[in-house]
Image (cartoon, helix red, strand yellow):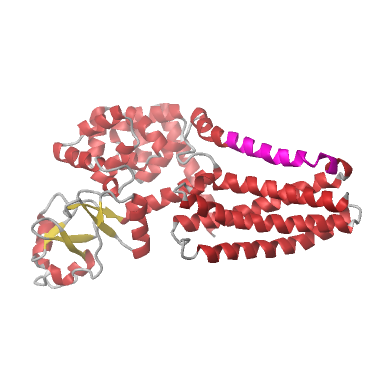
Amino acid sequence: MSTENDTTRGGAERILIDQIRAAVEAGDAAQLTALLEPLHPADIADVLEQIRPQERSDLLALWGGEIDGEVLSELDESLREEVIGQLEPAVLAGAVRELDTDDVVDILEDLEEPAQELILEALEADDRAAVEQSMAYPEYSAGRLMQREVVTAPLHWTVGEAIDYLREHDGLPDQFYHVILVDPRMRPQGYVTLGRMLSARRNARLADLAEDSFRTVEGEMPEADVAYLFKQYHLISLPVVDAAGRLAGAITIDDALNVLDEEHEEDMLRMAGVGEESSISDGVGETLKQRLPWLGINLLTANVSALVISLFDGTIAAIVALAALMPIVASMGGIAGTQSLTVAVRALATRDLTSSNATRVVWRELTVGLISGLIFALCMGMMAWAFYGRDIWLGAVIGSAMIINLAVAALAGVVVPLVLNRLKLDPALASGTFVMTLTDVIGFFSFLGLATLVLL
């Protein structure tokens, strides 16, 4: 059922994009507006990302005056600056004025200085000051992530006073989940959920309805640590304080989820060696710039494996079957190492793998590697005996090499990221290269070395 729905949805999207392309090609602004207006900003951003650059430019020329600020916020970072550069200053001003400060900061972070200044000039004085204060915090920090539009109330207020204030106040943020209780110095003392406040009597004191668990973070805290707090403690929003403990803003769950998603995406891209900012929308030049360095490193490490093989030229020449079996040993080790590595890197990212349980995890992976090696050693030993001259010693050699390589691969898959993490290096960035090189070298050396000792 899900597959059918996905297929139907995919077909509908293709039809819609074809209709949008036709409207752009015909220069039909009315038809283009009719097609785009019902769409969510995220879907419009997807359309802009999927069409060709010239089509995107023509679309913006026809429809750019209607663009919503949320579309800019949803756009892929690699396209955002291009789209902003094609908008008229007045259109850009109208779009960004509707955004909360956290969304404006998110847009500004990835732009060059001229484009940043263009957006800042479009903001009203108060909004510009708030955005510049957020931009003063370190990159990837809580201060950059927070929205400065928050709802506060004094500790002594009643529910009725708070509700009346909310009804009469025009400057409320688009999304908020708590009313933050502050003292006269604007230091947060707790918060009340909207649900709890709306279900209480009007004369109930907000201080009596405050949540038992209350946390704040400083603006300099890394955003990855903030996202961890949301995940660990099931938070909906989190107040941010300055160095003096005064309320500076609040982070909402949607922004925390974006950080978690970005962290996961970056880990995947780093492990694949394609650059943490790689995107399907990147051009050929940008894609090459991100991929070539790691391909070059892989070429160097592959030559290490080739050097190991060259040490056993005589053995391979004497027993031709070894050349056919070598890729099997290397491939099995590579897969086992990747399995262990993926689990370890993800566990480090989610903080499930720490110094307190590292030893247990290492022993578990080694045990799994040994058992897997034994199972596939028996299978491969019998296959080698059956298909390569019924030589029992050849089967024993490849079986032994399989046990050694799978055990080393499983062990390396967890130890290498642990060591890199201890050295304050990103485990996702270099672990794959180290593990694959290690499994290839150990696999070839053990297989060909044992063959030299046993079969010659």
Q: Is residue 283 magenta?
A: no
On the picture, is 300 further left or further right than 13? right
Q: Is residue 306 magenta?
A: yes
Q: Which residue is painted at 72% across and 38% down in the image? A: 307
Residue sitting nearer the eye, 23 or 243? 243
Q: Quadrant of residue 300?
A: top right
On the picture, is 182 further left or further right than 397? left
Q: Position of residue 12 (x, y in %)?
A: 48, 46
Residue sitting nearer the eye, 162 or 117? 117
Q: Which residue is painted at 13% across and 73% down in the image? A: 201
Is 94 drawn above or below residue 204 in the view shown?
Answer: above
For the view shown, which residue lies furthest in the right direction?
Answer: 389
For the view shown, which residue lies furthest in the front direction?
Answer: 453
Is 225 drawn above or below residue 297 in the view shown?
Answer: below
Q: Which residue is painted at 56% across and 55% down in the image? A: 415
Magenta range: 295-315
- Overall secondary structure of the magenta section: helix
Q: Position of residue 352 (x, y in %)?
A: 46, 62
Q: Position of residue 60 (x, y in %)?
A: 35, 30
On the picture, is 226 further left or further right than 383? left
